[in-house]
Amino acid sequence: MDLKIETFARNLEMNDRVNEYIEKKVGKLGRHIGNVDSTRVDLSYVKSARSATDRYVAQITIRGRGFILRTEERADDLFAAVDTSVDKMQRQIERYKGKHQRGRGDGVPASQVVPEPVELETSEEAQSIVRRKTFTLTPMDELEAIEQMKLLGHDEFFVFYNATTDAINVLYTRRDGTYGLIEPKLG
């Protein structure tokens, strides 16, 4: 599928060589994804960039039916910025296609796989607390709380009294394996 590519330049001169290069490189992305409405390439030269290796910026935005994919890369050369941005866009397209087009692979639509929703009882008995747990909080800092969380085998969260802030905090494990801290305040 041929992509209709709109190219915009800021603080740099566009010539035939750059246009042909963009058409060639970005045009190849059309092979990997369908249902594309527009493809936009923004090129710019940032004179005041912190590093000389970040002066040229190439941003690619692909809009389609139900999705928007965008990459931005910086380099010391315009062509290098376009190359790395195209590579990054190719990875984004593969990730998008993997999530949205591959499916389960058994040919059965999701509407047939999902069970019918079961209506829950809304009586007071169904909404009552069925278990209460009390425990003693010992003051500790955040690093001690992480160690305690690991030692106790609490994978999702750990409630502790933060000795440095004199408040009760909740330490939790994030999806990427790092930790988060909830510091509640009275309103």
Image: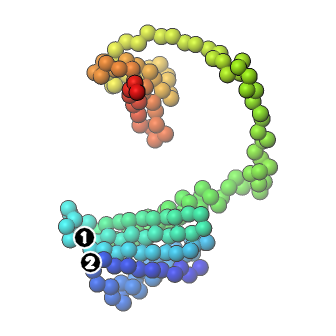
Using residue 8 as the reference point, say whether residue 174 is left or right of it: right
For the point 78% across and 35% down, the residue is 118
Q: Position of residue 13 (x, y in %)?
A: 28, 84
Which quadrant of the figure contains the C terminus? top left
Residue closer to the observer: 155 or 49:
49
* Residue type beneath disc 2: Asn
The colouring scheme, among rainbow, by chain, secondary structure or one colour, is rainbow
Residue that badge 2 annotates = 11
* Residue type beneath disc 1: Val
Q: CA distance from mark 2 to mark 1?
A: 7 Å
Q: Position of residue 100 (x, y in %)?
A: 62, 58
Q: Residues within 10 Å of mark 1 (few under 14, many from 20)?
A: some
Displayed quadrant of residue 1: bottom right
Name the secondary structure under disc 1. Answer: loop
For the point 59% across and 58% down, the residue is 98
Whether the residues at callouts 2 and 1 have beta carbons within 8 Å, the answer is: yes
Q: Position of residue 183 (x, y in %)?
A: 38, 28
Displayed quadrant of residue 123: top right
Would you say residue 147 is visible in this rendering?
no
Question: Disc number at residue 155?
Answer: none
For the point 35% across and 20% down, the residue is 167
Above or below — where is 84 with respect to 135? below
Q: Earlier in the sequence, mark 2 or mark 1?
A: 2
Residue that badge 1 annotates = 46
Name the secondary structure under disc 2. Answer: loop
